[in-house]
Amino acid sequence: MCGLCGVLGGAEHWAEGRAGDGLAQPASLRPRAERLRRVGIANAVLTHFSLTLGDWQGAHYLLSNRTGRREIVDDLAHLWLAAERMIGRACDPLDPTLIDQLEREG
């Protein structure tokens, strides 16, 4: 990210917090490892919508579907809106049916 984009980007979203910010995350993780951990957790849910999330340059996320469509997502707050645009329907990560399925899968 260029310096200007960093300045214009504003404050970091709360979901992007670092260990030691009062969030329940292992303090031993470095920022990069924390970010990749969040990507892994998001992918556990996104897989059920045939989507994949990846880190993009440590500043954004890259959301992809199976046909190769991609969208850059600035932060986790915008992830679910982008996922809904990509699949063309509601994408509720807190849907009780989805949560039950995730719990069964471990």
Image (spheres, rainbow, N blue to C red):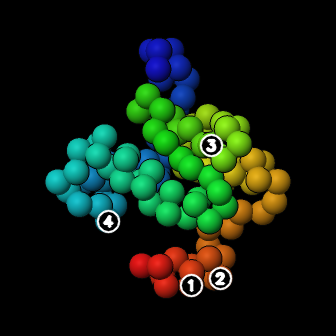
Pointer 2: what residue? 97
Secondary-structure class at tag 3: strand
The answer to whether the residue labelled 1 contacts the one labelled 2, judged by CB atoms less than 8 Å apart, is yes
Q: CA distance from mark 4 to mark 2?
A: 25 Å
Q: Residue at (67%, 38%) from the top-left corner? A: 68
Q: Earlier in the sequence, mark 1 or mark 3?
A: 3
Residue 100: which disc?
1
Residue 24: which disc?
4
Residue 64: which disc?
3
Q: Residue at (56%, 49%) from the top-left corner? A: 52
Left of 39 or right of it: where is 53?
right
Secondary-structure class at tag 4: loop
Q: Earlier in the sequence, mark 4 or mark 3?
A: 4
Q: CA distance from mark 3 to mark 2?
A: 23 Å
As drawn, which residue projects farthest toward the left? 28
Q: Residue at (42%, 79%) from the top-left corner? A: 106
Q: Indicate the position of residue 20 as horizontal and vertical percent values.
A: 24, 54
Q: Residue at (29%, 61%) from the top-left corner? A: 25
Q: CA distance from mark 4 to mark 3?
A: 28 Å
Left of 18 or right of it: where is 84?
right
Q: Earlier in the sequence, mark 1 or mark 4?
A: 4
Q: Earlier in the sequence, mark 3 or mark 2?
A: 3
In this rendering, the label closer to the viewer, 4 or 3: 3
Query: Of 17 and 101, which appears nearest the observer?
Result: 101
Q: Residues within 10 Å of mark 4 (few under 14, many from 20)?
A: few
The answer to whether the residue labelled 4 contacts the one labelled 2, judged by CB atoms less than 8 Å apart, is no
Q: CA distance from mark 1 to mark 4?
A: 23 Å
Left of 64 or right of it: where is 7?
left
Secondary-structure class at tag 2: helix
Query: Of 44 and 78, which appears nearest the observer?
Result: 44
Q: Indicate the position of residue 95 as horizontal and vertical percent values.
A: 66, 76
Q: Residues within 10 Å of mark 1 (few under 14, many from 20)?
A: few
